[in-house]
Image (spheres, rainbow, N blue to C red):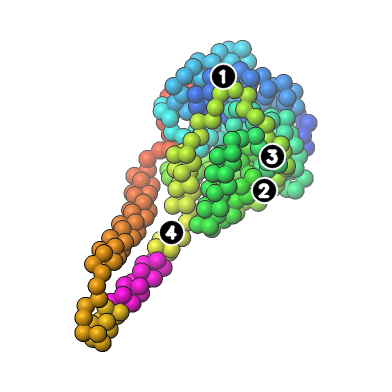
Amino acid sequence: MLKFTLGTFGAIGELDETLDVIVPLYNDEEVVRPLCEAVFQNIGDKFSSLRLILVDDGSEDRSFKLAMEEKERESRIEVIRLASNFGQHRAISAGLKFAQADYVAIMDSDLQDNPADIPLLIEKMKSEDKMMSIARRNSRKDHLFKKVFSRIFSIFSNALVPFKIDSRLGSFRVINRSLVSQLNQVEESTGTPFSLLYYMNIEFSTIDVDRGSRVAGSSSYNLRKSIKLAMDRILTYSIKPMRVSVIIGILSGVASLAIGLYTILNFTIQNKVAPGWTSIAFMTSFFGGMNLLFLGIIGEYTGRIYLESRGIPRYMVRSNTINESEE
């Protein structure tokens, strides 16, 4: 069984304190330069060593090229290029593999997360002796649809997984080196690093922040990706859907027996078969559909077991600028 152990902390400002900032990129050519400038302007002199690790998640635009140009201007930038688009959380996992600092910050590329809040996250984490600190949104400047869907996603997810997640918590966080090292030892291809931390009940600190608007471009996190994230979280870390299907199956069986009993009594007492071929066809199709639904749920779990047993990696790295000796 995987266990996490608590690491030690120093005080911000000590010369031996280092920070790695991991930022996944996907078709973010408009924000690459503002992102790099914001990170180094806000926290460039607050740590003895600072690295900005940009993980290009198979972008189809000029994101990788611009990231490499920023690397040429600033030696503290490192660029990891994945072989294809594997998704935000797998890109984060790739960044974590290369992280070596005392603290590792994870933030989105659109600068809705303020790099200046990173030292505050670390201070809160250290003062409460925690392994992780997460930014909790006071407000968010997103479209109404995204806000509503995010809330629905949170309610649905919390109802089916064994851990509860505040819908105001996002990906912006800081993790200490001890926890990162142990995360990197986990060989899991269907889950996500954040969900794993919640599942393991890792205690964390929070600070309240105001989330700004995107600097440029539009979010690539669409409805399909949100649903996939929900499915990964629910089907990897919970068996509640299978239990729910068993309960519904029992209730459906009871309803079927009740309908059969009604038909028999109606024939015996009134000496006629109950009319209603439409209702019979409806019930047949309904229960047939329920069977297919439950088989699909079971198939999802079986498929994930199959994928895990094959040891398929979560991502493949095409290239990186980090020296092998630093890994």
- Which mark is on residue 288? none
Q: Residue at x 69, y 39 (%)?
A: 139
Amino acid carrying mark 2 in the image: Phe
Q: Which residues are magenta?
A: 246-260
Relative placement, left or right, of 249 versus 65 is left
**Disc 2 versus disc 3: nearer the observer:** 3
Name the residue beneath numbered marker 4. Answer: 241
Q: Residue at x 41, y 28 (%)?
A: 84
Q: Secondary structure at mark 3?
A: strand
State the CA–CA distance, disc 4 to disc 1. Answer: 41 Å
State the CA–CA distance, disc 3 to disc 1. Answer: 24 Å
Amino acid carrying mark 1 in the image: Glu
Q: Secondary structure at mark 4?
A: helix
Which is more N-terminal, label 2 or label 1?
Answer: 1
Q: Secondary structure at mark 1?
A: loop
Mark 2: few, some, or many residues within 10 Å (few <14, many ≥20)? some
Which is more N-terminal, label 1 or label 3?
Answer: 1
- Picture coordinates of residue 223, whole percent (x, y): 47, 39
Q: Secondary structure at mark 2?
A: loop
State the CA–CA distance, disc 2 to disc 4. Answer: 28 Å
